[in-house]
């Protein structure tokens, strides 16, 4: 069976998401605005980040689905091959 590859793109997306959250928070806190404007900014940025996170999650799920499907097909192929070899060996042994 093949070894799994690490998910570097998933780690990058997660890091980028955390960086965006940190940058948004720092930007809002450092801005010289009254409290109610800052609250509106935080709410607006939060909505943007949630939308971005949902998009990233959907992409991650699609990628995971493709990987699982590919792995399942390979396992099915390997099992089929092993069953055929075992049946062939059994026929040869009976002769």
Image (cartoon, rainbow, N blue to C red):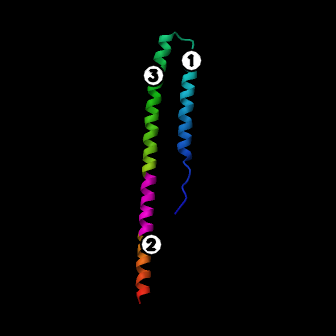
Considering only order in the chain, which callout, 1 or 3, is on the residue closer to the N terminus?
1
Q: Which mark is residue 67?
A: none
Q: CA distance from mark 2 to mark 1?
A: 62 Å
Magenta segment range? 66-79
Q: Is residue 24 magenta?
A: no
**Which type of secondary structure does the marked residue at label 1 adopt?**
helix
Query: Residue 92, image x and y in percent?
Result: 43, 86
67, above or below 28, in the image = below
Residue at image location 43% in from the left, 35% down from the top: 54
Question: Which residue is denoted by mark 1 in the rendering?
Answer: 29
Q: Quadrant of the C terminus?
A: bottom left
Q: Quadrant of residue 93?
A: bottom left
Question: Which residue is denoted by mark 2 in the rendering?
Answer: 82
Residue at image location 48% in from the left, 24% down from the top: 45
Query: Residue 33, image x and y in percent?
Result: 54, 11
Q: Is residue 73 magenta?
A: yes
Closer to the eye: label 3 or 2: 2
Question: Which residue is denoted by mark 3 in the rendering?
Answer: 44
Q: Which is nearer the eye, 57 or 3?
A: 3
25, above or below 69, in the image = above
Query: Residue 17, image x and y in percent?
Result: 53, 34
**Which type of secondary structure does the marked residue at label 3 adopt?**
helix
Considering only order in the chain, which callout, 1 or 2, is on the residue closer to the N terminus?
1
């Amino acid at each position: 069976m093949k070894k799994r590859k690490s998910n570097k793109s998933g780690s990058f997306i997660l890091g980028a998401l955390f960086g965006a959250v940190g940058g948004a928070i720092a930007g809002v806190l450092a801005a010289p605005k009254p409290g109610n404007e800052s609250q509106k900014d935080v709410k607006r940025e939060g909505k943007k980040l949630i939308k971005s996170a949902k998009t990233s999650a959907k992409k991650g799920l699609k990628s995971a689905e493709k990987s699982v499907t590919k792995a399942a097909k390979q396992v099915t192929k390997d099992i089929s091959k092993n069953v055929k070899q075992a049946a062939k060996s059994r026929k040869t042994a009976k002769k």
